[in-house]
Amino acid sequence: MRIVFDESTLEQGNNASRSITGVLYFDFSGYPFPEERWSDFVVVIATWWLDALEKLERGVDHEAVLRFMDGPYWLTLTRQDGNAALLRCTEDRRGAGVVHEEYIELSDFAAQVGRIARQIASACHRRGIESSDVDALRRYLPN
C-alpha cells in the first residue's frame, strides 16, 4: 500500500476560499482508491487525516475515519491488538459499500500519512501557496 501525491497537480484556486487541490489517492498493489489520479482538497484532507490518526494512536478513539472531501469516499481504521489495524475503504454509492479491506501496521500507515502531509506542505512552500489551511496542516508537522 502506498499513498500517491502528484505535486505537479497542486494548485490554489482563485475563488474566495483559495482552496488548494491536487492529485492524492491510495494504491493498494494496483487497486487505486478512490480512483487513480483522484483530485481533491489535499491540504484540508491531509490535516483531517493527521488529526484522526493522532487520536487513534493516543487511544482517544478506537476507530479513525479518513475522509476525502470530494465524493462519498473514506477509509476506516479500526485498532486491533497492539499495532495492528483493520483498514476498510468505503464508497457510499448504491451497490458499493466496503470495496477493499486489509490489515495494516498502524505506525507504518501513520508514518506514510505524515510523509505525504510533509510533501504537501513542502510543495505549497515551494510554490508560494499560503493559506490558513496550510497553517493548520503545518501545526501537525514537526519542525
Image (cartoon, grey):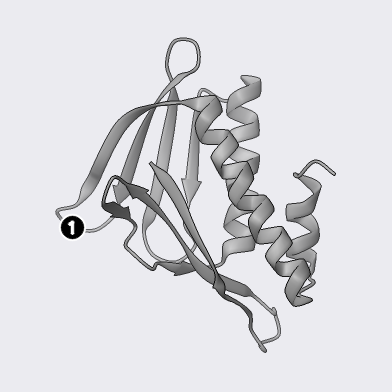
Residue 60 position (above or below residue 143): above
Residue furthest to the right: 143
At 78% across and 67% down in the image, what residue appears?
Answer: 125
Q: Tell me where residue 50 sits by quadrant.
A: top right
Q: How far across and down, in percent of the image, does residue 79 sit?
A: 46, 21
Question: Which residue in the protein does label 1 denote?
Answer: 94
In the displayed structure, would residue 73 be above or below residue 127?
above
Q: Quadrant of the N terminus?
A: top left
- Identify which residue is drawn at 33% across, 44% down: 89
Determine which quarter of the picture holds residue 12.
bottom right
Image spot of residue 16 (x, y percent): 71, 85
In percent of the image, x 61 and y 19: which residue is there? 59
Whole-percent x and y of residue 45?
57, 56
Which three-letter amino acid code belongs to the residue tagged 1?
Answer: Arg
Query: Residue 102, percent across and down?
Result: 30, 31
Q: Measured along the vertical axis of the image, is residue 56 above or below residue 140?
A: above
In the displayed structure image, the side of residue 124 where residue 103 appears, left or right: left
Quadrant of the frame with the C terminus: top right
Viewer-nearest residue: 91 or 31: 31
> Is residue 89 toward the left or the right of residue 76 in the image?
left
Please tell me which residue is depicted at 31% across the width and 47% down the height of the picture: 90
Dot 1 falls on a residue whose secondary structure is loop
Q: Is residue 60 among the parts visible in the rendering?
A: no
